[in-house]
Amino acid sequence: MSDPAAADEQPTTPASPRPASAGEAIDAPPATLWDRMRRDPQYAPEHLAVEAVRRLGPEAARWARQARAEQPGVTAETLAEQAVRRFVSRARLSGAVSGAAGLPGAVIDVGVLAWTQARMVLHIAAAYGADPEHPDRAADLLVLQRVHKVAASARLALGVAAGRERAGALFGGGGQAPLGRVMLRLGVRLAQMAGVRAAKRVFAKVIPGAAIVLGTWANSSATTNLAERSRALYRRHGNPHIPSPRRPPEADDQSA
């Protein structure tokens, strides 16, 4: 069975670090990923997608194996629904996760939301029998989260991001833009990945009280829409003869 985003070429990625162990905290992006995204905010979604597959893919695979062992005869649909409920609930709580005010807090919040959503997508993939540790899942993430329209452009961007990371390691990052500009650019890119309208979502936290109201509703809505797209994709992986359910265009509208 071919993977949903499979093609002749594979994404070029840097060498994989040690995967996260079962007891290692993976509820938020690791510090090394934040450093990488801050150095290269233009390709922040690509860096996050690759790191998510590396660190969260093994967890999703373990979860699916354990769930099937504990629930004999459980269907892929049931497992996927369990994953969706778990991570939509987490997404609702991530709107004020950082505890920091202003733009830095907003950037952290949307980064955690994008990470939580990636974790959900990988669990859904595992529920339907797709390998959550396969490099193609990074391209899937970028398409499902609407950073790229098709898998081919996602794979190309992943290769570019990997090349920029290697170049930065060899030659340094050169002149760094002012921190405020970097944080704004990073926030916009992560907000795009998280499925919320960047300007409203990123700046909402700067206004006292706005982030709590907006964050809970927008995070839940964006994550639920992502879950539906993910289930449609990986449902076809489990049975390619099942057509995707047709939904009215307004159901995919993203609100913030």
Image (cartoon, rainbow, N blue to C red):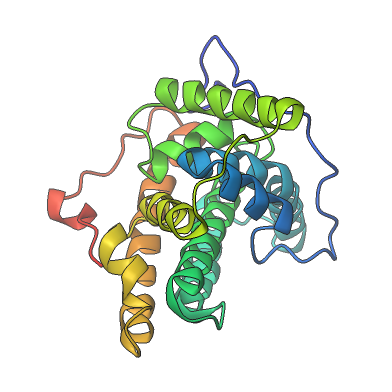
Does 97 sit left or right of 95 as displayed? right
- Horizontal and vertical percent for residue 39? 60, 44
Quarter holding the N terminus?
Answer: top right
Residue at image location 84% in from the left, 60% down from the top: 22
Residue at image location 65% in from the left, 58% down from the top: 29
Residue at image location 50% in from the left, 44% down from the top: 45
Does 212 sit left or right of 176 as displayed? left
Is residue 8 or residue 165 the one in the foreground?
165
- Horizontal and vertical percent for residue 149? 32, 31
Would residue 5 be visible to someone looking at this image?
A: no
- Horizontal and vertical percent for residue 93? 50, 79
Does 204 sit left or right of 62 as displayed? left
Q: Quadrant of residue 169?
A: top right
Of all residues, the one furthest to the bottom in this rendering is 209
Q: Quadrant of residue 12?
A: top right
Is residue 76 or residue 222 the one in the foreground?
222
